[in-house]
Image (cartoon, rainbow, N blue to C red):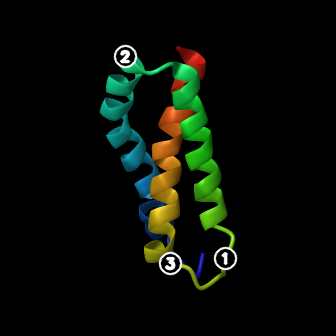
Amino acid sequence: MRGFSALQIGLAVFSTGVFQVMAIPIYVVLARKIDLRWLMMFGLACFALSMWRFTPITHDWGWRELLLPQALRGFAQQFAVAPTVT
């Protein structure tokens, strides 16, 4: 990625994990009130949206351009994966 070091690449993709952890309390509250199939559908839709946000990616992208799609992907993963193991 644009000559980034391993640390810089790690920081660029760090947002995925941060937003996944931030989604845990939201998921827990919603899982008590909403059918898990709906939460899973929401998570998969958000995941698809995050992948669509990556379509214009070029070699010029840096952490600023990666932040939103990565954050959305991390948030979506919590909602897409957790219902399958519950």
Real-space CA distance between mark 1 and mark 3, rounded to the nearest whole angstrom: 13 Å
Please give the count of numbered marks on the rendered protein. Answer: 3
- Say which residue appears at 49% left-offset and 75% top-offset: 65
Q: In front of the other: label 1 or label 3?
A: 1
At label 1, counting other C-alpha atoms closer than 10 Å, the crowd grade (few under 14, some 14-19, many 20 or more) is: few
Q: Amino acid at mark 1?
A: Pro
- Say which residue appears at 48% left-offset and 47% top-offset: 74
| Residue 79 in the image, given as x and y percentages of width and height | 50, 34
Q: Earlier in the sequence, mark 1 or mark 2?
A: 2
Q: Earlier in the sequence, mark 1 or mark 3?
A: 1
Label 3 element class: loop
Real-space CA distance between mark 3 and mark 2, rounded to the nearest whole angstrom: 38 Å
| Residue 30 in the image, given as x and y percentages of width and height | 37, 26
- Taking depth in this image into account, of 69 and 31 the one nearest to the observer is 31
- Say which residue appears at 60% left-offset and 66% top-offset: 53
Q: Is residue 44 above or below residue 5?
A: above
Q: Which residue is mark 3?
A: 62
- Is mark 3 in CB contact (under 8 Å) with mark 2? no
At label 3, counting other C-alpha atoms closer than 10 Å, the crowd grade (few under 14, some 14-19, many 20 or more) is: some
- Taking depth in this image into account, of 29 and 65 the one nearest to the observer is 29
Q: Is residue 57 above or below residue 43?
A: below
Q: Which residue is mark 2?
A: 32
Q: Is residue 24 above or below residue 28?
A: below
Q: Which residue is mark 1?
A: 56
Q: Is residue 14 left or right of residue 66?
A: left
